[in-house]
Every structure is written in C-alpha cells, then in structure tokens.
Image (cartoon, rainbow, N blue to C red):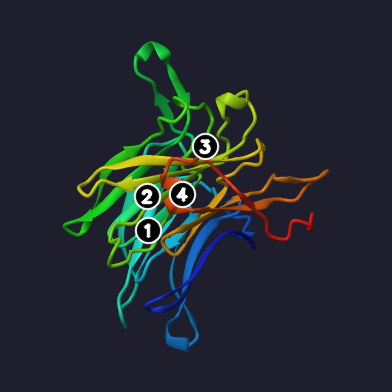
Amino acid sequence: MDVWGLSLGDFAMGTLLAVGYRTTATDPPFPLGRFAIVVDESGGGPQLVYSGQLLFGGSPSVSADNYQVAVGLPGGSQVVVVTSGPNEPWVQEQVISGPTGIGFGTAVALRGSLLAVGAPQASVCVVPPSTGCVTSGQVYLYSRQGGSWQLDQVLVSAFDGVPENALLGSALIFSVVTSSDPVPRLAVGAPAWAVPSRGGTNPDGAVLLAEHNGSSMWSLQARAITSPPDPNELGTSVAFSGTEHLVSGAPRHDEGPREVGAVLAYRVPVFLDGFELANLSRWSAAVP
C-alpha cells in the first residue's frame, strides 16, 4: 500500500487521522486510490469512521476541524466533506465539484464554516483581454450557508501582475480563531512563483496572506519571498502557530553545496506591515 497524504490532529472528538492511499489491486488494471478517516475518541482506540474512493487517481489532500473533515480529490476535481458529532456516526455532508483540468482539490483548508480549495493549474486571464491568459493558480473560497457549502469567491493574485506557472493554491492553511480575532487569516502557498525583479524564471516560491473584510470578501494583503534570492520553492507547505506566527517549507533551499531544505518563519504583524522579506529560520540544516 502506498500512502499519499496525511492529516493528523487533536480535536474535540479526540485524535483524528485522515489518510489517502493506493492499493495494490490489479483488477481494475490500475491500483485503486482510496482515502480513510480514523478517529481515536477519548483514548478508546482507533476506529475507521469513513472511507471512500479517489476518483481518477491523484493524491488526496485533507483538512480536519472539530467534527468535520474535507478531502480534496484533484484527480476528480472534487472535495468531499464528511461530518460527525459526539457519539454520532460520520456521514457524507456534501460533494463539491469544481472545474476539471485545474487541479481543483490539490489543497484544502477547513475552519468552522469556511472552506478553501486550491486549484494550482487554473488559468487567469488578465485585463485587458489582449494580455492573454496564463496558468497561475486560484483559490476557491466557500462558506456553509443553510446547511450546504456555497461558493463565495475565487481568489487570484495581483502581485507582480499574474505570474505564469506560480502554482498558487498548492498549499493552504487557516489561522486559529480567537475571541479577539474571530475571522481566520488564510495562508496560500505558491511554490513556483518566479519574482520578475530576479529575472522571473527561477521558482523562488512565495507565501501570500489573505484576510477577510468582515462581510463576504477575501483579499490578498501581503506576500513573503526569501532574501537573499533563493529558488527554494517556498510555499510548498504552510502552517500557523497560534495567531501571529506563520511558517512555510522551502524544500530546495541550499546550504552551501547541498540542497537541504529549510523552514521560513514569519511574524504576522510584521508580515502585514508590507515587508516582503523575512529572516530564514532553519531546522536541521546540516542534514542533507
């Protein structure tokens, strides 16, 4: 069995593991892709609570928040949302279908009644139309309304125009919600972002931060890139620690002659002041 994607966390119901995997079955001729959700409620032992098939292969993405899990199936351009409650069975709440051929479901982020879905192969057409269209990536933003998930907005980037092949939406994460900050921020990874001022050809990567305006609209407020220039694919993964700290994986960061990878750390208050550059914070840089 080949494992494709994992999501692990401690939630109100206990410890949850969501995993995508591929079986070795030969009938049909191609291995069958599946995903499973396992929960250990209150230390009572792990239980398989939900499973399903991955449409048309592809690597699943998963995000869990309390008694709900979103599973992105980019091969089938779908996101499956399953929900539960204390001592209740897990049920499929909704299947959200997106446009085909754009990687819809490559990344998902779930927080309360908000859902973000990455589509890094989506094309963006620049105004005026004579500028043409480029494959840049988009993020689809949904909210739960009246018991179902409804599309609110499609988020694209205006930084540096629209960079081609940026893979915007390859990684997504919502910040935590607090009483003083009830609406989460959204971090969006674009690991193939090429910065024009650096020649516009190397995949420097970037992380963009989206904020909510208090009604129904999201907008990209800030962008992080590396200093000095480094084609390290920043934005391959993103994570929040609390409400003020954002980290991102840069797997192709060089340390001397070796490509060792790195983690970049940012403080959100500085990030939002408009600074695009941040100090590099490395973990185990000596390990190739």
Residue at the spot of label 2? 116
> Which residue sits at x=55%, y=34%?
193
Density class for disc 3 (Cα within 10 Å; few <14, some 14-19, many ≥20) is many
Which residue sits furthest right? 257
Q: Amino acid at mark 2?
A: Ala
Secondary element under disc 2, as helix, strand or loop, is: strand
Residue at the spot of label 3? 167
Q: Quadrant of the C terminus?
A: bottom right
Density class for disc 2 (Cα within 10 Å; few <14, some 14-19, many ≥20) is many
Residue at the spot of label 4? 270
Q: Amino acid at mark 3?
A: Leu
Q: Are marks 2 and 4 in contact (CB under 8 Å)?
A: no
Question: As displayed, is residue 268 above or below residue 222?
Answer: below
Q: Horizontal placement of 207 versus 128: left or right?
A: right
Alpha-carbon span between mark 2 and mark 1: 7 Å
Q: Amino acid at mark 1?
A: Leu
Q: Are marks 2 and 1 in contact (CB under 8 Å)?
A: yes
Q: Are marks 4 and 3 in contact (CB under 8 Å)?
A: no
Residue at the spot of label 1? 110
Which of pointers 4 and 3 lies earlier in the amino acid sequence?
3
Q: Are marks 3 and 1 in contact (CB under 8 Å)?
A: no
